[in-house]
Image: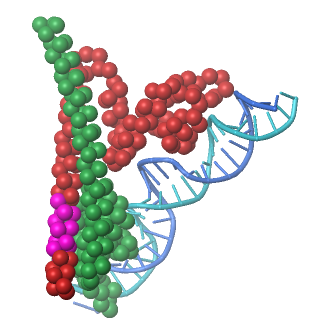
Chain colours: A red, B green, C cyan, D blue
Amino acid sequence: MTIGELAQRAKVTPRTIRYYESLGLLAPSEREGSGFRYYGPEVLARLKKIDYMKNLNFSLDEIKAVIEVYYTEPTNRQGKVKIIEILQTHLKETDEKIASFQQFRAEITTQIAKLQKSVEETDTKTS
Amino acid sequence: MTIGELAQRAKVTPRTIRYYESLGLLAPSEREGSGFRYYGPEVLARLKKIDYMKNLNFSLDEIKAVIEVYYTEPTNRQGKVKIIEILQTHLKETDEKIASFQQFRAEITTQIAKLQKSVEETDTKTS
DNA sequence: CTTAACATTAACGTTTACGTAAACGTTATC
DNA sequence: GATAACGTTTACGTAAACGTTAATGTTAAG
């Protein structure tokens, strides 16, 4: 597919796709004499993965690093072990993020409860 | 305390504090003839809250909105109910974030398991 | 084979969250 | 009361992640 079609399916602009290419996040499957970029469906999958991670507030640099780990088929035992270590770092960081958000969540519910109690008291007083 | 002391305790620069003031995120407790800003300890608490929320990837605009809700003592029943509604929106969004991160976490552990199995197989084959 | 629709590169613009001078006033200390 | 240390405003600089022309080439449809 062309860059316009790909962009439409991925709900981004062509500019975004070219920008990602310039960062090494993806590449056209083919590029013949005319200079036009043509893409296969695997690039669409990649764009969806990028969008997914962007929603997790990863920077494009971080996404690039993660994608490289995901898409690299490690040749030898050494490579596999190294990637496992990287993934375990990601796992730890993700757990910390989750914990932070859960604490934030708790603060919100506390605030809600406090306000709800306050509203109820106002109600019983004026009833 | 002065802006320098506050900055040091909050582990930010004076520039950051002035920038936050320009956005309406905080204000000096006092500002007399000389033009110097003097702060009370409550501003330090505010800065810590801002830093905490920044780590949750909130923008300064979003943080401002949240802080306004947190620090606004609602006068009447109407105001309280409104704030409860806002907080419930935050709650929902936070839950979605947590869910996304948990899915990401699951993907990581899957990848790790796959690689670990692959490593073990390599090991038994060559043993 | 003309023309609309889409592609290409190059380059400047935009927003966020500050960093970093520059030019100058204030305060605390000796 | 000089001087170092810190404060003030103004304003230009920076990185990230694109948006937006501009000038030009390519492709597909009639």
Which residue is found at the position 65% from the left and 23% from the top? Answer: A33
Where residue D8 sits, quadrant-wise, is bottom left
User: Horizontal placement of A88 versus A26: left or right?
Assistant: left
User: Horizontal placement of B113 versus C1: left or right?
Assistant: left
Q: Nearer the viewer, residue A5 or D12?
A: A5
User: Horizontal placement of C3 versus A37: left or right?
Assistant: right
* Number of callouts: 0
Q: Position of residue A126 (x, y in %)?
A: 19, 86
Which residue is found at the position 20% from the left and 77% from the top? Answer: A119
The relative height of residue B4 versus residue A69 in the rendered view (above or below) is below
Q: Position of residue A122 (x, y in %)?
A: 19, 82
Split into 4 quadrants, where in the image is the N terminus of chain A?
A: top right
Split into 4 quadrants, where in the image is the C terminus of chain A?
A: bottom left
Residue range in magenta is: A106-118
Whether residue A85 appears in magenta in the rendering, the answer is no
Q: Position of residue B70 (x, y in %)?
A: 25, 72
Which residue is found at the position 21% from the left and 59% from the top? Answer: A104
The relative height of residue B31 versus residue A107 in the rendered view (above or below) is below
